[in-house]
Every structure is written in C-alpha cells, then in structure tokens.
Image (cartoon, rainbow, N blue to C red):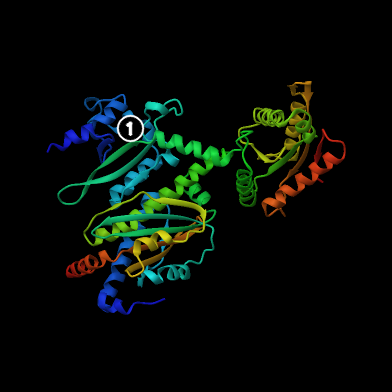
C-alpha cells in the first residue's frame, strides 16, 4: 500500500522537518489549509513561512523531542494554534484562527537515531467553540453577563495571592441598586431584570478590561480592581454612581430613574481570606445605604 | 505498606539492585540534559524504587507526599514494551513561578490570559520532565515508548483513582519516586513513575540485557 496517498488524504495536517528546521514533508491537508504547497515549502526553513514558531517554547519542545525522543503536545487549550490558518466550517466566525491541537514527535533512522521531527495538526475549532460556551455557562451570570459569585471568589483569591507574593494592590467596590424591591413591585420582575442588565452593561462598558464585575447576589454587584489604590477605586465608584443615576428606563407608567450606593475598600495586610476582603467594602456599602443612599462611602 | 512477599519471587535482590542502578543512571542522565533544554539547574533526589501491590498503592502514595492539597497535578501515560503512568505534583503557587521561569510572566495581564500561560507552563514542564525521565529510562534499556498528552488539574485534591484503575487491586507495580527541585527558583515537587504488571517480565529481561553489557 502506498502510505503517501494515505498521508496526503488524511484529515490531519502532517509535516516533517530536519534538525535544521528545513521542511521535508508537507501533506495535502497542510497544503489545503495553508497558503503554501509542497513545492514552495519543502527544502526551506519552517521559520521562513511561520516566523511565529521561532520562539523559545517551540524551540525548547523540539529540543526536548530531539534529546529524549518524547512527544511534545500543544493542545488548543491553552496554546490555541501553532500554524496560523483560517478557520473553516460552522465555527469560522467565532475565531480569527483555526484552533489546533498539535503534537511533535521523533523520526528515527535505521540506527534508532532521531534524525527529524514530525508534527501532526488537528483542527479543534469546534471543540474550542464548545469549550468557550461551557466556560461562559460556568463563569457568567446568565441574566446580567457579569461574572457569577464563584468567579468572584476565584478572582479575589488570585488577587490576594498576587498581593501577598508580589505586593500588588487591588481594591473592591460593592454596588447595590437603591430601592430595587420597589422597582420590582411597582413595574414587575421583567422590568427589574432589564434594570439589572442595563446597570451591569453600563458599568462593564465604562471600566478597564482588567477589572472584573461580578453579580454578588440579587441587585448587588462587586467589582474587583487589580493594580488600583483607594483613590482610583473611589474615582471609578463615583463614575459608576453618575452613570447609573443618568440611566433612564421606560415603563408603562412613564420614565423611571434609579440610583445606586457604593462601598469602597482596598486590600490590607491582615486580609487573609475572601470573606475578609469583602467585609470592609460591604460595611462601607451598609453605611452608604443607611446614610441616605445614592452615595459612595470609603471604608474606614 | 506491604512490600510484597511476591516481590522476592518477581525480582531477586540482584535484580532489584540493577533496577535501582538503572533508575539512578536514567534520572542522572535526564538531569544533565534537562538543564540544557530549560536552562535551569534541576536537582532530582535519588529515585526511591519499590514494588507495591495495587491495593496498597494509594496508602503508599499518601505516605510519600509531604505537600498538603490543593496542589497542581499532572498525569501522563506511556506505552510500548514498557507500559505505565507518570504523575507529578507541584505545590499551589508553583504555576506562577514556572511561568516566570519560562520567561512568560507578564504584569497586568488579563486573568484569563494569565491562567492560560500558567496552564501552558505546567503542561510544558510536566511533559518535558516525563519525556526526560521516561525517555532516558527506555533509552538506557534500548527501547522506545509513546506518550499520551498530559492531563492537568490545577489547585485540586486528586484521589489518584485513575492510576488505581489502571493498576488494578491485584497487580504488582514498580513505583519510582523522586523529588525534584528547580534550583534558584524555589520550586519543588514529586515525580512518580509507575509501570504496570504486564511490563514486569519485559523489564526483568531488559535489566539482564543491560547488565550483559558490563
């Protein structure tokens, strides 16, 4: 049987290259998904065509396979891809590049010496799309699109670790929509849901990508602000307060305005747990609520 | 732990001594070349080799691990004439140090991107460690094996059910433990290599072939 015909029609990319990274084989799948045919690429350096591969990680893994004869794996999670290629099929609109799982392995001569390497490339775009959806389901609050409580706990633990180890500060803003029960009672729960969605979206669209907004419960949100001191956090809380006060909703009874209260705190040395981190901004929020609402209180 | 009565039947004292020597040579060779590949001095402790039954395996393992969970664990199988399983334990927090060690650490990263880099660092280092230790072992015994992709669990408390399922209660396995330390980076952890019972006969034969060279 002519194995080259199998390799040329198989639904997986296969290429080989020697110790100098010169391409020795380039199968049909690689030709149809890349911009290059075997006549162009064989005999040339892989890096002439894929300069993105000339990085420490790829070289280190190739060296490991050449030295130990093991396999090096580049799964789509976390590596996304090795060979930039346009995604095809149903999921092409979700990713800029085809998501790939690649494996590098050794090819030996008759003396059992490793003389070259092969790479297999599998299109994992569909699996990546499904994984992305699962992650969203587990991390996000379905109504508001903000992170859920579990994600919030994770982010605080991460920031606490960074604070303890690298002394990187972070701050926390607790947000509570004022009189939300009245909004639900007077205008109905669907209207209340619209308010929650708009408030969440408004805050998400007006903060750095690095910040994390989570729905803490009911009408309460919590925002984690990495690399931010108390001054920066209170400025953002004040910005949020003005944004929310400026939102107008239309109900059957006419236009409805809302306000929110804010508690702000920054991480301190004696905070060792998620609960300890949340207590100060929560206490400050309580003071904002009991001293008139539509205001921001900085933790003492 | 039961050091099997059967072990004396399966492996004579001389064979056990050769087994220990082969592990010493393999892991010693691995260290030298690992340093070249990841440009870091790694110390592996003298491998501790025991023959253990499947039913004692979990207890044996628990006694040998001095890091309290949660920790990062990486599991990987290898197959060929030598079949088995590798698992590694890195303490929680090591993912950040390994990311820095590989030169991938960046400040102010999006947490999703940061986790992606940390996963990548654990998978890569785990795979290279497995490749080095198993690769050098089969190299010394003049054989080749294939590997499955590493399976990573971050910040977990693994039950080690997977290796137990693979081993079986009645099986006898060779368990090799080594502690590794990435010098100057304050990263340490455990590396376990378990070969299954089907490999024992091949292993014995390969050990004798190895000794015939001398």
Q: Quadrant of residue B4?
A: bottom left
Marked residue chain, label 1: A
Residue occupying image coordinates x 28% and y 37%: A21
Give residue B56's position: percent from left, percent from top.
40, 72
Give residue A299's position: percent from left, percent from top.
80, 44
Residue occupying image coordinates x 47% and y 71%: B63
Q: Which residue is mark 1?
A: A47
- For label 1, the SS is helix
Give residue B84's position: percent from left, percent from top.
32, 60
Q: Is residue A148 visible?
A: yes
Residue occupying image coordinates x 84% and y 43%: A287
Q: Quadrant of residue A240?
A: top right
- In what quadrant of the picture does the N terminus of chain A appear? top left
Circle 1: is it few (<14), some (14-19), or many (20+) Cα within 10 Å?
some
Q: Residue A20 vs residue A141: left or right?
A: left
Q: Residue B90 vs residue A275: left or right?
A: left
């Amino acid at each position: 049987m002519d194995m080259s015909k199998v390799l040329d029609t198989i639904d997986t990319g296969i290429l080989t290259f020697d110790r100098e990274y010169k391409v020795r084989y380039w199968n049909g799948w690689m030709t149809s998904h890349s911009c290059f045919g075997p006549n162009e690429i064989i005999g040339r350096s892989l890096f002439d065509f894929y300069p993105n591969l000339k990085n420490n990680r790829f070289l280190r893994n190739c060296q490991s396979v050449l030295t130990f004869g093991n396999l090096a794996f580049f799964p789509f999670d976390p590596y996304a891809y090795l060979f930039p290629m346009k995604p095809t099929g149903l999921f092409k609109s979700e990713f800029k590049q085809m998501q790939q799982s690649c494996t590098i392995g050794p090819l030996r001569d008759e003396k059992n010496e490793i003389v070259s390497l092969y790479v297999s490339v599998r299109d994992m775009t569909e699996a990546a799309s499904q994984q992305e959806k699962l992650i969203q389901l587990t991390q996000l609050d379905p109504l508001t699109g903000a992170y859920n409580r579990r994600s919030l706990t994770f982010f605080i633990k991460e920031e606490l670790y960074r604070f303890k180890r690298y002394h990187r500060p972070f701050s926390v803003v607790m947000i509570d929509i004022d009189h939300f029960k009245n909004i639900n009672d007077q205008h109905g729960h669907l209207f209340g849901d619209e308010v929650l969605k708009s408030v969440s979206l408004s805050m998400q669209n007006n903060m750095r990508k690095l910040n994390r907004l989570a729905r803490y419960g009911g009408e309460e949100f919590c925002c984690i602000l990495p690399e931010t001191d108390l001054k920066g956090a209170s400025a953002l809380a004040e910005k949020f307060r003005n944004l929310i006060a400026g939102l107008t909703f239309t109900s059957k009874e006419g236009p409805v305005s809302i306000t929110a209260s804010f508690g702000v705190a920054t991480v301190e040395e004696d905070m060792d747990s998620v609960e300890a981190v949340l207590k100060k901004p929560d206490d400050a929020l309580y003071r904002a609520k009991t001293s008139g609402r539509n205001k921001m209180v900085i933790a003492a | 732990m039961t050091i099997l009565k059967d072990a004396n039947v399966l492996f004579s004292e001389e064979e056990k001594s050769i087994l220990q020597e082969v592990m010493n040579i393999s892991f010693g060779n691995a260290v030298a070349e690992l340093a070249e590949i990841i440009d870091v001095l790694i110390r592996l402790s003298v491998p501790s080799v025991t023959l253990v039954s499947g039913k004692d395996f979990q207890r044996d393992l628990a006694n040998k691990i001095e890091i309290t969970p949660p920790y990062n664990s990486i599991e990987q199988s290898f197959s060929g004439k030598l079949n088995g399983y590798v698992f590694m334990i890195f303490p929680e927090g090591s993912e950040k140090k390994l990311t820095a060690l590989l030169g991938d650490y960046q400040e102010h990263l999006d947490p999703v991107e940061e986790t992606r880099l940390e996963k990548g660092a654990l998978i890569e280092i785990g795979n290279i460690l497995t490749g080095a230790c198993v690769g050098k072992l089969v190299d010394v015994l003049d054989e080749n094996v294939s590997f499955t992709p590493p399976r990573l669990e971050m910040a977990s408390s693994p039950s080690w059910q997977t290796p137990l399922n693979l081993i079986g209660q009645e099986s006898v396995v060779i368990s090799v433990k080594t502690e590794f330390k990435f010098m100057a980076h304050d990263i340490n952890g455990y590396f376990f290599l378990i070969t299954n019972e089907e490999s024992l006969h091949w292993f014995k034969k390969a050990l004798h072939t190895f000794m015939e060279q001398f």
